[in-house]
Amino acid sequence: MQIGIIGLANVGKSTLFNALTQADVPALNYPFCTIEPNVGVVMIPDQRFMDVVDLVKPEKATGAVIKFVDIAGLVRGASRGEGLGNKFLSHIREVDAVIHVIRAFADPNVSAVEGSVDPLRDLEIVETELILADLQTLENRIERVTRMLKTGERKYAEELELLKETSQHLNNGRVDLIDVERLPNDLRLLSVKPVLFVINVDEEQLGEPDQLEQQLAPLKEKASARNSEVLLVCADLEADLADLSPDEAEEYFAEYGLEASGLTRIIEAGRQLLNLVTFYTIKGAETRAWLVPRGTPAPQAAGKIHSDMERGFIKAEVIEADRLLEFGSFAKAKEQGAVRLEGKDYQVQDGDVILFHFNV
């Protein structure tokens, strides 16, 4: 699964992507410097996993990762194909969730594509382009389904009603009312993807939290209506501090009243955005963290490791990572009856340490 980083041009998307992935991607001052999406794999900071590794002391430790995609900046009119808009919109269609980067910093050396800095306006421009693209997708689908109904294919009647209802919600700007679970999987609407809003500020703004809160209140209200989180980040600062040790960076961010770097908060928010849970395996030479969608049954989680394990799944021995750390070893936890046996219907929980049993 992957998260796309979107927004207007010159808002700091590529700078943020560079900091996240520590990759050298062009971050130039013109609209289409990214054009083709850049893809980076980012390790999820996980202290719980590190504690398990310290306990087990394996030959190899492999953390969980999330894939981020830096998608070129949208421009007003993208839904009509302006600014290579169709190509960029197709890149957004391929990702599972989006981080929408919005500019709040003022820098005369970095042009604002709309001529001024206005976070709420910029949010609405991007959302409008996504909605317009979705309305076109729905119109095309409605025409096709209507033709199928005329040939006697009555099974499409319910879909047609759902498509028209969805189109009406989009026309009213009420993305929050759309029943995403009922939509056909191949529709791949843009505006209904899970979204995290990241406000890119400068260092001076970080030091003025009250003023910043007042400035961003309307934007946060709009995000809240979508049940979306808003994070404040200084992408330039994050990029500058990316090479520091975690302790050094933490000390620097503490000066601004932040408990963790914006990157750490974005990565964890990204995991939540994709509705993923982390489980751990400790058998053999490698201790590893794995990501699966929340609600994944144990056999499917085993299949993440190897298809044979899913096909021949018998049972799973499970203990929470925190409990394992209390006992000091898997064997001691098992002796004390703290390790549970779970069957094929068990849904993997965040923080589970699992030993899968299978036979093929």
Image (tube, rainbow, N blue to C red):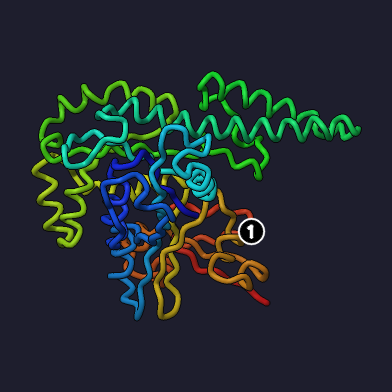
The picture places residue 338, in percent across and down from the top left corner, at 44, 60
Amino acid found under the numbered disc labelled 1: Lys
160 or 307, which lies in front?
160
Drawn side of residue 291 relative to residue 121, left or right = right
Residue 43 visible in this rendered orientation of the protein: yes
Q: Which residue is mark 1?
A: 344
- Judge the density around disc 1: few (<14), some (14-19), many (≥20) Cα neighbours within 10 Å: some
264 or 52, which lies in front?
264
Residue that appears at 35% across and 49% down: 268
Drawn side of residue 235 relative to residue 48, left or right = left
The picture places residue 254, in percent across and down from the top left corner, at 12, 45
Q: Please tell me in which quadrant of the rendered image residue 341 appears.
A: bottom right
Residue that appears at 50% across and 68% down: 355
Residue 351 visible in this rendered orientation of the protein: no
Q: Please tell me in which quadrant of the rendered image residue 225 appears.
A: top left
Residue that appears at 15% across and 37% down: 206
The picture places residue 231, in percent across and down from the top left corner, at 29, 38
* Element type where label 1 sits in the image: loop
Q: In the rendered image of this protein, does residue 177 appear above or below residue 180?
A: above
